Image: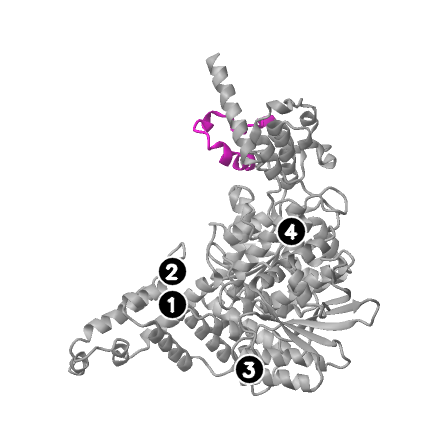
Amino acid sequence: MSTMLSARSLQDRAAEVLRRAGNPFRNYFARNPDDEVCARYHVPELYSLQREQLLGVVDLYRYAPTTHSEVVPILGNKGAGKTHLLYSIKHGPEGSWQLLVTPGVYQKDTEFLEYLLFQLIDTLLGGGKQKNTRPLEYVGEQVVRGTFRAALQALTPAERLELFPAPGLGRWARKLGLGTSQALERVQWLIDSLAKPVPLPFQPGALKKMCDEANLELSRAAELITQYIDRTEPRNTAGLMRRHILEGFSRAMLLGDEADLATFLTYGFAELDFQVRPSRQELVLALFKAVMGVLQSLRVPVVFAFDQLEDLLLARRSDDAHRTAEAFFAGIVQAMHQIDGIAFLIFAERGLWNRFVPSLDGYIQDRLNNPIHLPEHGTLQALRLEAPPPELVRRVVEARLRPALNQLPDAAELPPLYPFSEEQVERVARTEPTLRDMLQQFRHLFDSMVYRLPEAISTEPEVTSRLPKAVESEPISRLPQPELPPEVKSVVVVEVETPPPTTTEPAAPRSLETIWDHEVRSARRKLEPEGALTGATRELQAGLGAFLRIAHEHGVKVGPWRLQHVVPELSFGEHPTYGVLSIAHWVCKGGQPWKVGIGLFLGRGPAKPKDLSTKLTALELEPAVIDHLILLRPEDDLALTGKSKTHWQEAERKGRHARLEPVTLDAFAALYAFPRIITALSESLPEGQPLPNLADLLQDRCEKLLEQVCMPVQG
């Protein structure tokens, strides 16, 4: 009897712990490849073979960096776990480090190679981390180690002594050949230390620490590297670009100045002294090859992974889906012909892939379906994610339940899958088509067994009707309301976040706001480093275009103004970074619309006047495409001086209408995050359900920004 009472007491305490912790199966699905929820419930054994194969593909480009670029499709039904698999490659402990670019938006109106290049630059300069390391810090450490070591080795004995000038009378001793051994030993110690592999897990700051231990000033080390690069790099276009990239990494790693590298990658590369002025496309290709050359010399693989392809390509269901998909896949094939050394991973729904790829031109199909040979795995043409077997589903369930249950000192005495039975888990595993469907079933089963509330399984009849028969028929013990533990009410209110029902109105605005806050916080972290905002110019412009498009489609108004038409992105001129705008046609009370060009004015230092002059040329286009130009400028650098002021005054003399708007980092973060917010929201909705109307949310969260991108609102 005492054993039965003890067991009952343990299960009662376990149920209370679970109620307090909340339903671990509720809406915990990966929204994007950087969603930290993946780490919270990661089960390494799940899709371990597919992960090993994908890491094998990446390693092909590690050991043979100039291998022809290839495509690997990863196909599975919606909810199969594709995004989680991508997260584990980008952030997990398996495999070595690689530069993994995961675009959050497809800029279909941009040249594809240009689109890829600026996604790469944004990833390289941004504050986002991969395997707990910023790409700039990891790549920069490798670049500067090799260059610094080569520069030291090339010094003569006399030049090595000059690195460590002797104080006072020590100079006279040096001239007599005394006291030189210590300085030479320091140089040799530096050379030997720089030759050692970068210790893992990677920790930034090792270069500065080496210089400090050798008593070498960081500015002197940076100067030495610059002099070496100037002597050794060729004077052709590729050499000039490589020179600036290497010097930019040197300043970033040794002096903490990331602005030089960011400025060159977005501005300086187009201002080099060319004998024959290259076209916009030629500039992009030259810079892309220069960046890839630096990465390949370090054996750092470059991987472009396109996740949630259906949302990436079909942002608007009214788009010509076939034309969009054809442009996307044709762009990838073109990039494969122009740039070697890139692994393209495409995570797509199987139905979407089978719908689009067979209708593409033959040469595109051939490249997309070209098999890859992997050592130890044979020939790989595509990876397919099937529903996991029951034994792996069991591990997934345990990973979700155990963190809460392990708070109990005697948790080991509970059944392994408490509160579920082995039979229930196996039944769900054998009857549901995807991992997400299984987790949804466990969510409802958890509610019915732990909370024992009828509302827990009645709010979503379209899902509960799909519960296995044995689960539906299980009696639910409904406690009278007074007998419910007091914490149950708070747990239900705080933790239960049901997805929106199948109506056009959002049933859970708090969930939408949570998505918004999460993505904007993540975007802000990525934009905080010194050069990140500059490097994200094109990504921010794409976010601005998406923001205006949604505002138009959802009927957002700003005072008396409303949007009549939006062009998310217009490229013009020959500058790849600055030659782009979004266009919004604002109309007021039946009057003629004002065609407003809205651009990002982010250039700093010597890039500032070039950015401004390029944007102002949009007012000169024939036929005229805009009547008014609005430039969004970081609020900490709003003043126009020198050449910038001259360009602005010249436009005013010509009678052009333009204005500057000061923008906070938080507002830039909202633009950067916007495409990801829409994707995450789409993922959270039931299949086929359209987006809820977002007008109220945009006007609440972005009131100031809306006013800044609109015609002036009269008092």
Nearer the camera: disc 3 or disc 4: 3
Where in the figure is residue 526, as x and y percent of width and height?
53, 60
> Would you say the residues marked 2 and 3 are in contact, meaning their CB atoms lie under 8 Å apart?
no
Q: Is residue 88 visible in this depiction of the protein?
A: yes
For badge 3, the amino acid type reads Thr
Q: Between residues 250 and 346, which one lies in front from this camera angle?
A: 250
Q: Is residue 230 magenta?
A: no
> Would you say the residues marked 1 and 2 are in contact, meaning their CB atoms lie under 8 Å apart?
yes
Q: Earlier in the sequence, mark 1 or mark 2?
A: 1
Which residue has dot 1 on it? 145
Q: Is residue 398 magenta?
A: yes
Q: Earlier in the sequence, mark 4 or mark 1?
A: 1
For badge 4, the amino acid type reads Ala
Q: CA distance from mark 1 to mark 2?
A: 9 Å
Q: Kindly state the secondary structure of the residue where label 4 is placed.
A: helix
State whether residue 321 is above or below residue 151. Answer: above
Quadrant housing residue 522 = bottom right
For badge 2, the amino acid type reads Val
Q: CA distance from mark 4 to mark 2?
A: 36 Å
Q: Residues within 10 Å of mark 4 (few under 14, many from 20)?
A: some
Q: Kindly state the secondary structure of the residue where label 2 is placed.
A: loop
Q: CA distance from mark 4 to mark 1?
A: 40 Å
